[in-house]
Image (cartoon, rainbow, N blue to C red):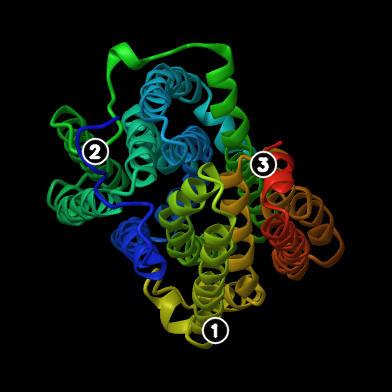
Amino acid sequence: MPTKKPYIDLSDPNLLGLILRLALPSVVGVSTNALQQVVNAIFVGALGAQAIAAVGMTLPIVVLLTAVGQGIGAGTASFISRQLGAGEYLEASRGASTALAVAAPTGIILTVALLLNLQGIFVTLGATSTIMPVAIDYAATLLLGYTLMLLNIVNGFIVRAEGNTRFSMWTMITAFILNAVLDPAFIFLLDLGVRGAALATLASQIAAISLYIAYFANLRGIVLVRISHISLRADRIRQLALIGAPATMTSILSAIAFMLLYGAAAPFGDDSIAAVGIAVRLLTIGALPITGFCIGSQAILGFGWGSRDFARVLKTAKFILSMTVALSVAYSAAVVIFARPLVRLFSDSEKVTEIAVSTCIVFHLFFGLFGIQSFVTAMLQSFGRARLSAVVSLARQGYLFIPAVMLFPVISGFNGLLASQAIAELGAGIIALFVMFHQFAELRRSLRHPTSRAIELAG
């Protein structure tokens, strides 16, 4: 047993207050990360359409890289919160320590592999001769800090899983402020161009990892990260991997989807590529706060599941659902209504603006369903239901979107490209709704038959 209480008591009877105390700092932190992407894009936008397109084309690589961290982090967070709910504090610490021990060498291996194949990747993405050198310059510099980025992602999940979402928030805010200050200095004052934007991001990652090292070294949390706690037992690693696998696969498929999207836009010229890049960035900005709310609340779901308090789990789930739906619908409406001024933040080109406005509107038509998808995925991860989580999470940018983006542009040109995203969003939302109603029915049955249902649901 620990000698001190967690930063926030996950068994606090004031459930709504607890959700807000955990979720809001997570929303602020993740939204700050989104804002960091906006600031980067605004400064890079001043360098021209080729620079915008080059940075946009690097987004699939960034998504692919963060996929590994999110997979390890999601599996670890689910494991930690359920172990804490069951009172297994040492086991939670072993899970966290093992996850970080696996993440470091993974980051180094992936960095080397990507650097050796960078040009081929951008050829696959459809980079033109004018975009290619700028994209390689930006991506190669960014990759130097990937291992740090990976460790920061996993650290964030660990800290949030034990209830300390505020520390994660302040770490992200610190990284953002540093990035925002260094961006114009490196890009314009030192005349480093897009490489300067990548160097600013690298510096912010160094600052973040320093804060996490201080956090664990000073024993600020209930989970202890120690070399002696590292355990390479197959069953423990399997538990982490199975829960995290859908999150990793979702992000990998998102990266593949973005590659296909840019590849489909390439025949229409640099302006179309830049427009799609702006629309994708706005989608990412809208998704991050919603994802942040789910991530921040996930610890409560996992803790309740681990302690078999199904009434608390159901009440928590309903509140999270209402918040995520409200956020996604509000953002969808805002982008559709204010598409033009939002696009103008990223480009002053009239041609890029005209294409980007229509792209943003179509891409966000059914974004209101994203809140349901995010909630259901987070809930299933908290329960340790890896397979069902994969069915929901892989739909939006996976088995629905990829066939559509490969087929529709061939049939209907650029309009077909736009339709592929909207149709995939709608289909994924319907699937998430069906799974959500089924899970709620399961939870209600567990309340009527607590002993038998607890055994069944645990399996």
Q: Residue at x 49, y 47 (%)?
A: 59
Please state which of the two labelled residues, at mark 3 or mark 1, is closer to the viewer. Answer: 3
Q: Within 10 Å of the Cα at label 2, are there few (<14), some (14-19), or many (20+) other Cα atoms? A: many
Disc 3 designates what residue?
Answer: 385
* Residue toward you, 370 or 268: 370
Which one is in front, 334 or 51? Answer: 334
Identify the residue shown where x is 40% and y is 70%. 16
**Image quadrant where residue 444 sits:** bottom right
Please tell me in which quadrant of the rendered image residue 52 appears. Answer: bottom left
Give the structural element (helix, strand or loop) at label 2.
Answer: loop
Horizontal and vertical percent position of residue 4: 20, 38
Q: Considering the numbered disc 3 on the image, is that residue within a helix, a strand or a loop?
A: loop
What kind of residue is marked 3? Arg
283 or 103, which is in the foreground? 103
- List x then y, in percent, for residue 340: 48, 83
Amino acid type for the residue under numbered disc 2? Gly
